[in-house]
Image (spheres, rainbow, N blue to C red):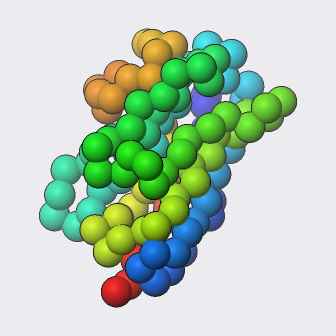
Amino acid sequence: QVRLVESGGGSVQTGGSLRLSCAASERIFDSYAMGWFRQAPGKEREIVAAISWSGDSTNYADSVKGRFAISRVSGTSTVSLQMNNLQPEDTAVYYCAASEFTRNAANSKGLYTYWGQGTNVTVSS
């Protein structure tokens, strides 16, 4: 059973930065694509960023391009999301996810099998 645990959420002011981490309970990164999603109150869960199993390919939501960066931490079962220049509209619960169905940096949440419990990110103006 794969277990994903997020950390690094918190509260920042507009323009600030946070780094989220996702630790897996087993070494799945050799074959699983990974993604970060977020869900704001009253809204659907949406893709933020995804990374392929090899780390060579990434995808980002248009709203975070140039501000967020997803990466795999070499030698560990950890994927990170560096978030810079945070804006109030980035406020949401952020979820880490792993896909056993694709190795590509997939944007569709339907392809993701395993989910973390989520971590809160609040950006105040």
Identified at 58% across, 54% down, the residue is 82
Residue placed most toward the observer, 73 or 113:
73
Q: Is residue 114 visible?
A: no
Identified at 63% across, 17% down, the residue is 54
Query: Horizontal and vertical percent for residue 89?
Result: 28, 68
Q: Name the residue at the front extreme.
A: 66
Q: Is residue 6 above or below residue 70?
A: below
Is residue 18 left or right of 122 when viewed as pictured? right
Q: Name the residue at the right extreme.
A: 75
Q: Looking at the rendering, in which quadrant would you find the N terminus?
A: top right
Query: Horizontal and vertical percent for residue 24?
Result: 67, 37
Identified at 62% across, 46% down, the residue is 80
Residue placed most toward the observer, 92 or 27:
92
Is residue 56 left or right of 50 when viewed as pictured? right
Query: Horizontal and vertical percent for residue 15?
Result: 46, 75
Query: Horizontal and vertical percent for residue 117?
Result: 49, 53
Q: Is residue 12 above or below residue 27?
A: below
Q: Is residue 100 above or below residue 122?
A: above
Is residue 48 left or right of 118 when viewed as pictured? left
Q: Looking at the rendering, in which quadrant would you find the C terminus?
A: bottom left
Is residue 57 left or right of 80 when viewed as pictured? left
Residue placed most toward the observer, 51 or 42:
51
Identified at 64% across, 51% down, the residue is 21
Total marks in image: 0
Q: Name the residue at the left extreme.
A: 42
Q: Is residue 62 above or below residue 121?
A: above
